[in-house]
């Protein structure tokens, strides 16, 4: 009895399951026949988007690497390379994203407009920072100065310690550190004091009107000739340059290595003073005669 009931249950269960599976298969076939074209179209779009994404990523990597090599060949500062490559990579990634979205037939005009509006808003909000960023790029590309150069900019003189995208760091002769915004540095007149290997030493020495200026000239010329730090070409220049209120001014111009400039400067001032004193040639200072009259 028990076995008979069990067999009947299995019979109905198997027939019901077969009928249910048949019904599902028929529904799937109907759906496929009705939507096969759309499904294939979506599948091709997805496949196309994947292909565009893979090829685009590979091309972006290649383009960024080639761009970096081109910058290196042009001598662009290594500090600037990651930033410029990052900007190019972001721009290409945005273009790739638009291409992928466009592959699905979506209208990307609105997206481009949104991105443009966002860029404008960010640009206005970060106007000062972007000016410093642009100034840093100009400095690193044009290279008006480099690390170690002594420059004068915005009334500050010091050696360049570092150049970043946003700031330039100077160290003054008295060991102060100055951080200057690149926007201000790029827009200012900058004097690079140590860029050239040679520099002209200019000095004016005044002697009294009663002294022999020819002898003073010979003494100064002898000091220059005896100092090997002075260059023979261009030839040193020692001439009377001005007749001042209290002195006859002798103009001295001679070329030295930039690295020796300050050593020569202080040594020559001491030597000129010593030799003129030995020769009894005075170095006058401004004087004023006062006449006093007594009235009865």
Image (tube, rainbow, N blue to C red):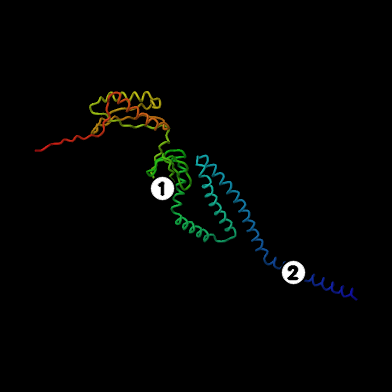
Location of the C terminus (image quadrant): top left
Graded by Cα atoms within 10 Å as few (under 14), some (14 to 19) or many (20 or more), the crowding at tag 1 reads some
Q: To which quarter of the image does residue 108 belong?
A: bottom right
Residue at 35% x, 29% y is 270
Depth check: give the residue in front, 166 or 270.
Answer: 270
Measured from the top left, where is residue 35 in percent x and y? Answer: 67, 66
Name the residue: 35% across, 25% down. 223
- Residue beneath disc 2: 24
Number of numbered discs visible in the structure rendering: 2
Residue 48, percent from left and from top: 63, 56
Q: Is residue 32 left or right of residue 92?
A: right
Q: Residue at x 57, y 56 (%)?
A: 97
Mark-to-mark CA distance, 1 and 2: 74 Å
Left or right: 100 as drawn, with respect to 210: right
Q: Residue at x 37, y 23 (%)?
A: 226
- Pick the residue in front: 180 or 199: 180
Above or below for 156 versus 42: above
């Amino acid at each position: 009895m028990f076995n008979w009931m069990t067999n009947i249950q299995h019979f109905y269960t198997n027939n019901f399951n077969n009928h249910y599976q048949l019904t599902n298969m028929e529904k799937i076939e109907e759906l496929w026949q009705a939507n096969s074209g759309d499904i294939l179209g979506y599948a091709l779009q997805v496949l196309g988007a994947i292909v565009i994404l893979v090829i685009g990523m590979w091309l972006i990597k290649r383009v960024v690497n080639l761009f970096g090599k081109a910058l290196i060949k042009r001598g662009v500062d290594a500090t600037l390379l990651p930033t410029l490559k990052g900007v190019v990579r972001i721009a290409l990634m945005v273009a790739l994203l638009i291409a992928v979205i466009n592959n699905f037939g979506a209208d990307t005009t609105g997206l481009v407009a949104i991105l443009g509006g966002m860029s404008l808003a960010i640009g206005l909000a970060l106007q000062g920072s972007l000016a410093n960023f642009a100034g840093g790029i100009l400095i690193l590309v044009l290279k008006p100065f480099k690390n170690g150069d002594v420059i004068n900019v915005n009334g500050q003189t010091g050696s360049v310690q570092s150049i970043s995208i946003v700031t330039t760091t100077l160290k003054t002769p008295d060991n102060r550190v100055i951080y200057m915004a690149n926007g201000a540095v790029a827009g200012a007149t900058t004097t690079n004091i140590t860029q050239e290997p040679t520099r002209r030493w200019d000095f004016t020495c005044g002697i009294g009107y009663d002294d022999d200026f020819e002898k003073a000239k010979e003494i100064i010329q002898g000091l220059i000739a005896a100092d090997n730090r002075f260059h023979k070409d261009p030839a040193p220049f020692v001439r009377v340059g001005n007749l001042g209120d209290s002195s006859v001014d002798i103009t001295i111009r001679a070329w030295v290595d930039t690295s020796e400039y300050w050593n020569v400067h202080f040594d020559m001032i001491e030597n000129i003073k010593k030799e003129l004193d030995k020769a009894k040639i005075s170095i006058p200072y401004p004087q004023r005669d006062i006449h006093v009259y007594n009235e009865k």
